Amino acid sequence: MKKPLLSFFIACILILMNTYASTTFAAPSVKTLWQLSFDSGFTFATLPKNDAVVHIRSKNVSHGVYHFDIMTIDQKGKIKNKWNVTEQDFILKKVKSEHYLIAVNYTKGIVTAYSLTGKKLWKYDARKRIDSIDQLNEWTYVFTAEKIIALSSSGKVVTTFKNVDGVKYFANDGSLYVLRQNDTTKYELQKYSNSGKLQWKTNVPIPTTEHPEQWNVEVNVEVKHISNTHVYIAVDYFKVKKDEFRTREDEMLQIDTLYAINTNGKISWSADITAYNVVEKNDRVIVEGHQFVYSIDQKGKPNKIFSQGIHDVYLTENGDFFFLDYDKRTLALVSSQGKYKWKISFPKKDSYFLYGQHTIFFKTYDSKELYLYEHGKQIGVYKSNDYFYLTGLDEQKRIIYIEEQNEKGSYLRALKY
């Protein structure tokens, strides 16, 4: 696990956080509800909450310590209450429909949870330096040099794991998978129960082709998805032969395999495909591969259900996928059976593609235009003389939250679409 969680959550707490913003013109289909000005800094998140929105914004960063102002803003753009917290790192955690903030002091080994109204919920003291923290579902994981401590949503210790070397992956049931590299071409997968007990370990098959001295071999192994029944592991094996001066590629061999390992550590099936993303859909597995989208049955037989060509595919959590063709300026939503649900043309080639659950956005590279689509139909356009970036989306109330920055300062703007 990596220590700097703050940058990860800034990018991922909402899928709609990318570039910069500052607006002076809105098309008639997009209405400005209110605008608030702020000092310099950056937005951590803008979260819809009942009849208001919670805005989390940095005030300053000094020597790796973050200071955040957390405020509740009503539907008219008035600040109802405001509080602040200063610490080395933060993550936003969600249990059911409630968000709360977890502050971390790595040096002192302390984790503190706050409600978004500023109430201290709980505090955990590891009594030693914390290397990193992570969270999944209702559990927060605290990593020290020797242990991984799992904390409940109330801050109580649920279980502990031995912190062995390797890449860690937590399953929804609280069990832990560790992918260990024992040699250049030797990988082992270990599974620990949610009580911290080692249940099994198994070797991940790696191709064993001959590779004399002039051949260079690279192996990449990664867990792509963990379900209730299987762990899906992608193995990319690449071998290249250099000429006698070892300055150019002479021959090459690439073998890509996806393995499905069951809950007992046995391989259920393997498929010779490149796997970028994996999603389970009913009794099948949908895989985004190189130039194709595959549907794999329970015996491991892959079926090409859609050709990606040289364009971009974005696999969604329900097994549908977006097919994006920048050259033709088209975007399509395709089902896991390869059927088109809708297809649209977007105005400009040089655009970022962003999406919520039902809403699609194309934001131009110069960050001055935003095109809105819903269920495959264009519903609005937003234009600006300055740069802007999206900090939050409330699809239920049909509101977009945008942060703007120009020479006069920073602004949070609520837009109704």
Image (cartoon, rainbow, N blue to C red):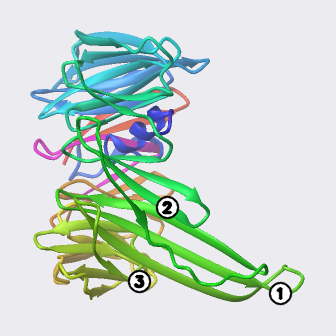
Dot 1 or dot 2, earlier in sequence = 2
State if disc 2 and disc 1 touch (CB < 8 Å).
no
Residue at image position (24%, 66%) is 279
Residue 73 location in percent, x, y? Answer: 22, 21
Q: What kind of element bears circle 1? A: loop
Question: What amino acid does circle 1 point to?
Answer: Asp
Which type of secondary structure does the marked residue at label 2 adopt?
A: strand
Horizontal side, residue 110 vs residue 212: left or right: left
Q: Which residue is mark 1?
A: 243
- Disc number for residue 181: none
Location of mark 3 (residue)? 291
Residue type, label 3: Gln
Q: Which residues are drawn in magenta?
A: 380-400
* Up-down relation of residue 350 to residue 97 (above or below): below
Q: How far from the left and from the top, in percent, is residue 385?
A: 47, 46
Callout in the foreground (2, 3): 2
Tell me, yes or no, whether the highlighted magenta stretch contains residue 128: no
The answer to whether the residues at label 2 and label 3 have Cβ atoms under 8 Å apart is no
Give the label, 1 or 3, closer to the camera: 1
Q: Position of residue 107 (x, y in %)?
A: 53, 15
Q: Which residue is mark 2?
A: 187
Q: Residue at x 46, y 83 (%)?
A: 310
